[in-house]
Image: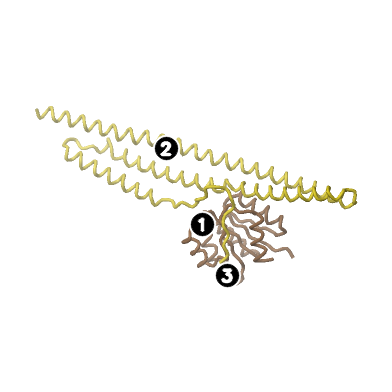
Amino acid sequence: MTKTILAVDDSGSLRQMLSFSLKAAGYGVIEAVDGQDGLAKARQQKVDLVLTDQNMPGMDGLSLIKALRGMANYKSVPILMLTTESGDDIKAMGKAAGATGWLVKPFDPARLTEVVKKLIG
Amino acid sequence: MASCELNASDRMQLQVASLLSGVSTHGDQHLAEVERDLVQMDVLLDEAIKKLCASFMAIDQAIGVQQETLDAVLATGMAAPEQNARLQALRDEIGRHVGAAVTGLQFQDMTSQLIGRMVQHLAGLRDVFGALGGNGAATLPESGSEEMLAMLDRIGDRVGARCAELNGLVRSTVNQRHMESGDIELF
């Protein structure tokens, strides 16, 4: 059965590149334009992994992670932060919020799919 | 003598008012131009990336179909082993280029964030110029160097307050200086 990934980013081109890379690796992809949209889509359909940007209008990535971790069916779903930010402080905040890992943009498709495969097969 | 001093004071006040007004108006005009150019650049980059992505996807799809066709030919056993190896090497090479292109095409996400931050700083600077101009000619004291100094102090305080607001306005979120893929850390 195809594993589904929720890709949350306010940049259309980034979502396009994520979708392209993950679909080429055999995953299904649901796109969301910001944290609020991501949360709504995660509620509509349980996904196998969430990839989220940090800096987005409205709800940011950290708030999305906290909201998802508060939902019973997302307690153990891997959530990866994919962001331009790489500071130790914000990484620590991501870890405390419940992120599974931290990926700094730009991403390399092969390395991204390798990590995703490691987490959800 | 007193009349002469008053005239000099009046002239100084007029010059200060003119200077403040000029700096405020021209500064604001130039910053508005820079802001417009940055917003236009962001729009152009956005449109460019959409076209680049669309073309890139189309090329990738065409290559995929071409490879399927080649696979069908190879399955007939008509190709020599060295041709098979060459085609496989080409396939790997294409895969590497596709990966590099996907990494490179993410530039717009970063440039857009940087432009957004610049625009916010420009808006803050325009506020600074606004504070300078808004307290210029309209509120000049009628006479007296002490009053003039007090007024300049007030302007200085307001500009200082705007500058302080500007410093804490937007945190830098993009520190990348090249387009190599970033670090990955699993917690």
Spatial distance from mark 1 to mark 2, Cα to Cα?
31 Å
Amino acid type for the residue under numbered disc 3 = Met
Q: Chain for mark 1?
A: A
Q: Which residue is mark 1?
A: A86
> Are labels 1 and 3 assigned to the same chain?
yes
Spatial distance from mark 1 to mark 3, Cα to Cα?
27 Å
Is mark 1 in CB contact (under 8 Å) with mark 2?
Answer: no
x and y, in percent, of residue B17 in the image: 27, 34
Question: Which quadrant of the figure contains the C terminus of chain B?
Answer: bottom right
Q: Which mark is residue B31?
A: 2
Foreground pick, B186 / B30: B186
Amino acid type for the residue under numbered disc 2 = Leu
Marks 1 and 3: which is nearer the front? 1
Q: Which residue is mark 3?
A: A71
Foreground pick, A113 / B163: A113
Is disc 3 placed on a helix, strand or loop? loop
Q: Is residue A73 above or below residue A109?
A: below
x and y, in percent, of residue A35 in the image: 55, 58
x and y, in percent, of residue B165 in the image: 36, 50
Q: Is residue A121 above or below residue B32?
A: below
Quick one: which chain is yellow?
B
